[in-house]
Amino acid sequence: MRKDVLIIGGGATGAGIVRDLALRGVECALLEMGDYCHGASGGNHGLLHSGGRYVVTDPPSAMECAKENAILRRTAPFCIEGTDGLFVSLPGDDPSFADPFLKGCKGSGVPAEELTAKEALSAEPGLSAEALRCIAVQDGSIDPFALVQANVDSAREAGAMVRNHCRVTDMVLEGGMVVRVKALDRRSGEILTIVPEIVINAAGAWAPQVAAMAGCEVAMGLDQGSMLVVDGRLCGHVVNRLRPPSDGDITVPNHTATVLGTTSRPAASPEDVAPSRNDMELLLRETSAMLPALRHCRVVRAYGGVRPLPGRGGRGASRTFSLITDERAGNLLSVVGGKLTTYRLMAERVSDQVCNALGARAGCRTRTEPLGPPADEAGGSVALARLRRKYGFKATTVSLADQRMLCSCEQVLRAEAQMVLAGPDALTLSDVMRRTRAGMGYCQGLDCALSLQELMMEAGGTEPLASLTEFLEERERGQALASGDQLRQEVLRRHVLQGVYGLGERE
């Protein structure tokens, strides 16, 4: 199978690249070893950055975020909540930081406005009464799974081949160029062979391993960050600590929950994502200083992700991105770093370089081409408006004639899961969860896992028992630090699924 371009990695960057190239008329394919958002694109807090976080410490990243924030609000509003954000200074914080912050916002093109304490508390009633200074910015929350799926769907419509659960296993080089790439398709067991003109390594934290298949090296630091999911929306805005980027200084309202983040430590591997008890205690302590109600919250889940950063990584590493070439494989281009917010810009820069090498003259269309309908598009029911926020243009393919509920925690209809299962991407129960949110609520799948397994059996083409076991194990990992009401919920969940149904039993 010949392709002009092969992209390896189906996170936001890879999905953005395959869409950009396909819209320019380039023959391209994307292969992802797991599901889309397998790595850092799914292991984050869903923050649409205004750029404010970086205006003092990393102005180039701040400028990139500010510009891309505005573009995404125009082109992908269906999966974005324009919550706006607040940067809050508390007793003990450096009182002199606010002035360079405001100056940095102005210099980086980040819209910002200082509020009085009264104005801040009026805008965010749950804010600490001890807040000293408060600056409003244009942060927001974004659904990374919906964003990436929309890019995949758009790329396919433009003629690209996109496959998840398809692991690259080997690269063959001749004359310092990658001439063949082999991959194993998990669905069929088929070995694919692709003959590309150019290979783009967008594998995130796995980029060094992909590059090594071509005898190349990618200098990268792996940085683990932990996050907590709190039941309910305990703030209306994204709330940030007004200080240099550090641990536990962001809260993001997202769908039915609030996400607390994040931490930073060196990661031993891309799979080194597990949060620690210390991470959980730190996140609750630091974020509750900004939002006191978090001291009494119910933590539904703890999870982590690994950031692929240039150089050695860490808090001091720039959040901008790099394009890396290596003469040992002249047609391999690796993209490293960046943010979810800047994925589209990364894709544009990569696509520009690729098209220049191919002699293709078509320009980038992703700055203006919509990924989905407006979030408040007129017409239709309240139910349809809710579906648009998750599925964009595909919302109208969900049958509203069947109002039976699959997941009561997240208000997911059976018809939503059926729509996803009828598509080409959902191989596992977790794949359906990422697209519908079934199983993401406080019961973590107790109410819907078996019903979803039943739907998968009806749809055929999957191994439902193995998929259910995989799903239960993944949900359990997120409950390793559970306490209080959530621990009691987890004990009940395990008793019902293991003790009553005999599922997920350990040897």
Image (spheres, rainbow, N blue to C red):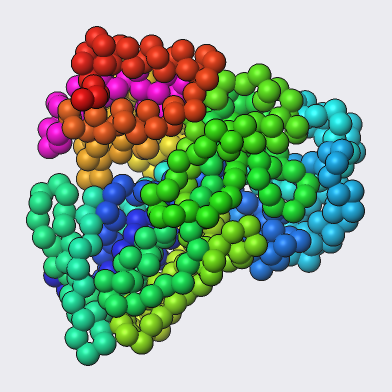
Q: Residue at x 76, y 61 (%)?
A: 56
Q: Is residue 505 left or right of residue 243?
A: left
Q: Is residue 266 above or below residue 456?
A: below
Q: Which residue is nearer to you in this view: 94 or 375?
A: 94
Query: Residue 225: where, in percent of width, then height?
Result: 54, 47
Q: Quadrant of residue 205?
A: bottom left
Q: Residue at x 79, y 41 (%)?
A: 88
Q: Which residue is nearer to you in this view: 369 or 428?
A: 428
Query: Residue 106: where, in percent of width, then height?
Result: 80, 62
Q: Locate the C terminus and report the quarter of the image it occupies.
A: top left
Query: Residue 158: where, in percent of width, then height?
Result: 30, 61
Q: Is residue 329 left or right of residue 440?
A: left
Q: Is residue 449 magenta?
A: yes
Q: Is residue 505 above or below residue 285?
A: above
Q: Which residue is nearer to you in this view: 423 or 474?
A: 474
Q: Is residue 357 left or right of residue 190?
A: right
Query: Residue 440: where, in percent of width, then height?
Result: 42, 28
Taking the image as drawn, is residue 64 in sight? Answer: no
Magenta span covers which residues? 438-463
Q: Locate the N terminus and report the quarter of the image it occupies.
A: bottom left
Q: Is residue 19 above or below residue 262?
A: below
Q: Is residue 482 magenta?
A: no
Q: Is residue 286 left or right of residue 45?
A: right
Q: Residue at x 14, y 68 (%)?
A: 193
